[in-house]
Amino acid sequence: MAINWNKLEIDIKNYLEEGRKNTEGKLRNFKSVAKQIELFYINEIKTNATDIFLNPVVLLNIGENIGLHKSLEDAFNVSFKNNNNSILNNAGTSGVLQHWASAQFSPLIPVLPVMVKGINNVIVFSGNVIPMQLKGNSDKEDFLAKEIVKSLKQHASTIQGLFTGLNSQGSIITIPWSGIV
């Protein structure tokens, strides 16, 4: 499987559009919007994220809160309430770094034909913070959804891990990898 970025973008866009219909044209409470976007992201990661070898992600200690909602809420507050049209360098993906620092992937799928048993598959670098462009008072749900997903996707490509396994001779082999798919 792979993260379905298009589905994530559509889910966010539809949620924002529905919210605008129900609140007479205004974006709903920033906190609830940010939390729902985080839940969409978590669900997609839990369901589809893999390392480049197609080992599924195993999330540790996150429950339903990875910090993304707080970063997004802060970004919305700065951008929309102050009508700020600048790129927010701290927004968005800064809230997921801690989550990825505590994530592991399954080591079940051997990386090389000589691999017989995976031992560990851990994140060694939780990725770069990617700027997210949220323009103040934008009424374009598709723009907001696209920018949020674009930043999350770029962030996922910067996550790095280390797969460790035993070959058929019993030697430990470590293979670095980069990017979540």
Image (cartoon, rainbow, N blue to C red):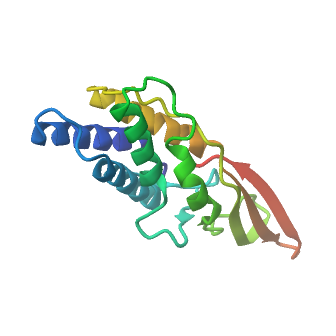
Q: Is residue 181 visible?
A: no
Q: Is residue 38 above or below residue 106?
A: above
Residue 138 in which image quadrant: top left
Image point (53%, 73%), residue name: 61
Judged from this view, the residue extending furthest toward the bottom is 170
Query: Front-most of 58 and 90?
Result: 90
Query: Front-most of 43 and 64?
Result: 64
Image point (66%, 68%), residue name: 107
Q: Is residue 113 above or below residue 82?
A: below
Left or right: residue 38 versus residue 179 is: left
Judged from this view, the residue extending furthest toward the top is 85
Residue 22 in which image quadrant: top left
Query: Front-most of 18 and 167?
Result: 18
Left or right: residue 164 versus residue 148 is: right
Q: In the image, residue 140 lies at what x, y percent? A: 28, 26
Q: In the image, residue 177 lies at what x, y percent? A: 72, 51
Image point (31%, 42%), residue name: 12
Q: In the image, residue 155 lies at what x, y percent? A: 58, 42
Left or right: residue 35 versus residue 53 is: left
Image point (34%, 34%), residue name: 81
For the image, the number of numbered tags is 0
Query: Front-most of 151 and 121?
Result: 151
Q: Is residue 85 visible?
A: yes
Q: In the image, residue 164 lies at what x, y percent? A: 77, 67
Left or right: residue 149 versus residue 170 is: left
Judged from this view, the residue extending furthest toward the front is 82
